[in-house]
Amino acid sequence: MKTIQLQAHDYDNNDLLRAAGVRRIYPGWYTAFYRGVSLDRSTICSATRNRGGRIRTAPPTFPN
């Protein structure tokens, strides 16, 4: 499963958040989880709101 940060009320992000099951869309950033190559309405699984309006950073990945 892949993750991406979405900002509410930009472009068509509200449609994606609705497809993920978010009922009330507040202004700010959301973490969306999706399966597949690209993010669209059919591949998005869920989304959660980032409290405090912060963008979450991904943990560093080191090559093995």
Image (cartoon, rainbow, N blue to C red):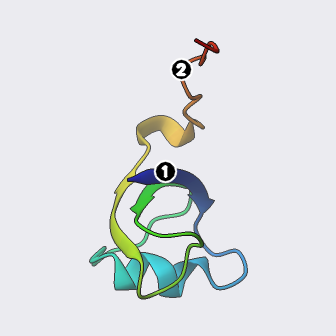
Query: Looking at the picture, how far across and down is residue 1, in whole percent?
Result: 38, 53
Give the x, y percent position of residue 7.
Answer: 62, 61
Look at the numbered disc 2 and give the secondary structure of its residue. loop
Instruction: State the residue at coordinates (53%, 81%).
Output: 14
Looking at marks 2 and 1 on the same chain, the residue that comes earlier in the sequence is marked by: 1
- Residue at 60 percent of width and 37 percent of height: 55
Indicate the quadrant where residue 10 lies. Answer: bottom right
Q: Which residue is the site of mark 2?
A: 59
Decide which of 17, 36 is in the foreground and name it. 36
Name the residue rendered at 56%, 53% in the picture.
Answer: 4
Relative to residue 64, is residue 36 depicted above or below?
Answer: below
Return the mark for residue 42.
none
Disc ID at residue 3? 1
Q: Amino acid at mark 1?
A: Thr
- Residue in the foreground of this view, choosing between 39 and 49: 39
**Looking at the rendering, in which quadrant would you find the C terminus?**
top right
Compared to residue 11, the image places residue 62 above or below, namely: above
In the rendered view, does 57 fall on the left or right side of 33?
right
* Image position, residue 61 (x, y; %): 59, 19
Q: Residue at x 63, y 75 (%)?
A: 9
